[in-house]
Amino acid sequence: MPFPRKRRPVQFSVEEMFKLEGIRKSRTEEKRRTVRAAFLLDSLSGQSDEAIAQHHHVSRSTVVLCIQKFLQFGLDAALGELPRPGKPRQLPDDAIVWVQHCACQKPKELGYSYELWTYKLLGAHVRQHCVAAGHPALLRLSRSKLHKILRQGELRPHKIRYYVEKRDPDFEVKMASVLHVYKEVEIVNEYRRGEAGRQLGMVTISYDEKPGIQALAVTTPDRPPVVGQYPTHLRDYEYERLGTVSLLAGLDLHTGRVIETVRDTHASADFIAFLKKLDEVYPAHQKIRVLLDNHSAHISRETRAYLDTTPQRFVFVFTPTHGSWLNLVENLFSKMTRTMLRGIRVASKQELIDRIHKYFEEVNADPVIFRWKYRMEETFIV
């Protein structure tokens, strides 16, 4: 004989009915939510608690608890779980703060040889000094609990994140000067589209060096891919060092063409040789504006002596200190590193030099005009 009901009947709004029907029919919802939705809908149809329990193979108390939660707290509470008291906290707030404070210090500052914490070292330090610090509850601190405490404070003391300090007091002014150059080049390029072949009074070159390009040779020949057998090239991990070269390259911001030279070093003599090459490439009536960083070779006595022999020919615009990322040619170098230089192996240093020159022949055969985007909307020509 079914138990009589001593509570008010359940009632749902149209939105709640639609939600319950969707949950009961869902194939992705949690099982407990679909079952509880079915309890509520069956109760609305007039079925007894006992019948609902038998139909879903649960106890009657499970059904009653679900319906009572709905009547007291609403639909979301009936479908979910109510807060429970749980186990009393083992660590007080001051102990957690002390652990996080320890994690914010470097191990070497506390007498260890380590530069950064490891979980093992930090856990041992906490357990060793917690009693003296007045937190004996940390004597049984586990690795998982330590991880939870650090995550709670959004701390990762075992890692380093690098950044570049703005050491140039005139960084913003110098950056604005560089961006003004890009803005001017953009305006000139747009104007020249309607007048093809018009000679410029001044060309702008984005210049930088890429030193230390390694010439590496394989010790055994590479094996090519084989259909159905080897999907990639196979290469012995050992290699032979044949030396390094430095690439000095200038990107013409008007045409996208690259003027380059490859040298063993990138000292003042190498930079002067590059300037002489620029002098030969461009007509004598054009000024050459060079956008470059603050490398010592660019402002050395030898470089200034050469510039004195070519007055009114070159104009230098320097990027801020630690601001070489503002130089557009860096994008060209990045693309080169990710494509032509990726995994490169050569038989000699000269082969590396020849392949670099060949790469820029291919680039100049189909040049791309690079355009600067970052913060350009804040730049105005005055």
Image (tube, rainbow, N blue to C red):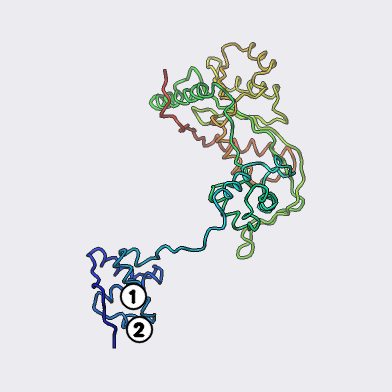
For residue 214, side relative to residue 149 (left or right):
right
Q: Which residue carries the number 2 mark?
A: 54
For residue 172, side relative to residue 15 (left or right):
right
Asked which quadrant contains residue 302, the reply is: top right
Q: Which mark is residue 64?
A: 1
Residue closest to the eye, 257 or 102? 102
Residue closest to the eye, 91 or 218? 91
Query: Residue 128: x and y, percent?
Result: 70, 51
Mark 1 Cα shell of 10 Å, populated few (<14), some (14-19), many (≥20): some
Q: Which mark is residue 194?
A: none
Query: Residue 223: x and y, percent?
Result: 69, 56
Residue closest to the eye, 294 or 343? 294
Q: Residue at x 33, y 75 (%)?
A: 64
**SS for callout 1:** helix
Question: Reading the chain from its start, which is encountered first: label 2 or label 1?
Answer: 2
Vertical comparison of 269 with 141: above or below: above
Asked which quadrant contains residue 65, the reply is: bottom left
Query: Residue 60: x and y, percent?
Result: 36, 80
Q: Amino acid at mark 1?
A: Val
2 or 1: mark nearer the eye: 1
Q: Amino acid at mark 2?
A: Gln
**SS for callout 2:** helix
Q: Mark 2 and 1 residues: CB-CB less than 8 Å, in contact?
A: no
Instruction: Identify the image quadrant of the N terminus.
Output: bottom left
